[in-house]
Amino acid sequence: MGALIGQGTALRIAVTVLLIAVLVTLVFSLAGNFFPEERVISPRIDPVVTGQPLLIVTTTYPFQDRTATVSVPVNGSVYEAAKVADKSITVIGNISDNIWIPQSYRAMIDDPAQEPLYADLLTEFRKNRLDWNLDDDEYLELIAVYVQSLGYETLEETPAKFPVETVVDKTGDCDDKSLLLAGLLSREDYSVALLSFGPEKHMAVGIESEDCPYGNTGYLFLETTNISYIGVVTGSLDNGRRIESEPVVIPIGMGRKTYTRCAETRNIEEMRVQSRTKAEEMEGIIQKMDTALTAERQEILAMEKRLQGQKNTGDIREYNTLVTTYNAKVSAHNTALQNYRDLFSRYETYVNIYNYIISHEYDRKGVFSFVKDAMPS
């Protein structure tokens, strides 16, 4: 459930319901010695049976004003083991939801069998960071856009994938992609969390930020299902509901780095809303002006025909009287036409700004610079 309808005019990449298949066994011992230890049995990639071929997974995606390419070897045996792993969760004892749910998600992110994949992916990202001289915020964006650019699939009533599955499949729903991104960012020392929205059945990633956190979480909102600006809550779910609830926050790792460009992405979002609002307001005025100009033009053409007839018949008196009216009409029409052109030029400016913002969400840096220069004062 929950395809995200973007803020633009086109239907954006969809998202899906947050779902982990859960087998909860709550066992209470009257004597206190049937189950001496309360515990959670989380999904794991085990056993890994060798023999599967090495998989080379290459992903190309736009980033800033260039194209990024990530190519990594994936242990085929780990991937196959992850696919067939039992993803149910067994809770033994009186363990609350706010303990076993985060523990299970962290187990899927941090399964040791996936560490070589994380290392290979981060090696690729670090090469690009070095080549392109990216700062910490841009590096975070580079990794985020990689995950956002992976395909989205709606998988109703299915458990979450291990990150290795999402990488190889190049697709996932909201929880699949959020787990992968959180795993990557936490290993690069970012302060990251999963944001689980129960009422909306949705999951996103949180990045610590003092400037513009989501609600009372202390983390800004990072959508993983489609390419979007960090800190901007995009659109609404396909059932018409907006993401409005206070999420359950599940910290991942012990990172310290935060995101510091949220003020820029918020400014971009404000300009997106403003440019669309201005363009829509102008559309109605332009349509009315166009109708009036067309009518005036027809009237002028009719007057020109009458003038030509009077000229041909030698009716100079009537001709001179009509010429005065004609000239005044043409002058007023030309003034109205120039006003129309000026308004249409401003309308085109707002349309171009809006379209640029919604079509370059992989380039926060370039869009912010573009908006500053292009937005009318």
Image (cartoon, helix red, strand yellow):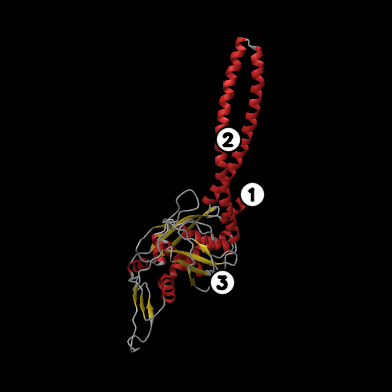
The answer to whether any part of residue 119 appears in the image is no
Give the structural element (helix, strand or loop) at label 3.
Answer: loop
Q: Earlier in the sequence, mark 3 or mark 1?
A: 3
C-beta proximity under 8 Å, tags 3 and 1: no
C-beta proximity under 8 Å, tags 2 and 3: no
Q: Position of residue 250 (x, y in %)?
A: 47, 71
Q: Amino acid at mark 3?
A: Arg
Instruction: Pick whichever, 347 or 252, lies toward us.
Output: 347
The answer to whether any part of residue 54 appears in the image is yes
Residue 5 against residue 130 in the figure, above or below = above
Q: Is residue 92 left or right of residue 150?
A: left
Q: Quadrant of residue 29?
A: bottom left
Residue 28 against residue 192 in the figure, above or below = below
Instruction: Pick whichever, 55 or 237, lies toward us.
Output: 237
Residue 318 against residue 47 in the figure, above or below = above
Q: Position of residue 304 (x, y in %)?
A: 59, 20
Give the structural element (helix, strand or loop) at label 1.
Answer: helix
In the rendered image, which quarter contains the N terminus? bottom left
Q: Amino acid at mark 2?
A: Met
Give the structural element (helix, strand or loop) at label 2.
Answer: helix
Task: Say which mark, if any, is on residue 62.
Answer: none
Task: Say which mark, if any, is on residue 289.
Answer: 2
Q: Which residue is mark 1?
A: 373
Q: Position of residue 52 (x, y in %)?
A: 33, 66
Q: Which residue is mark 3?
A: 256
Residue 235 against residue 187 in the figure, above or below = above
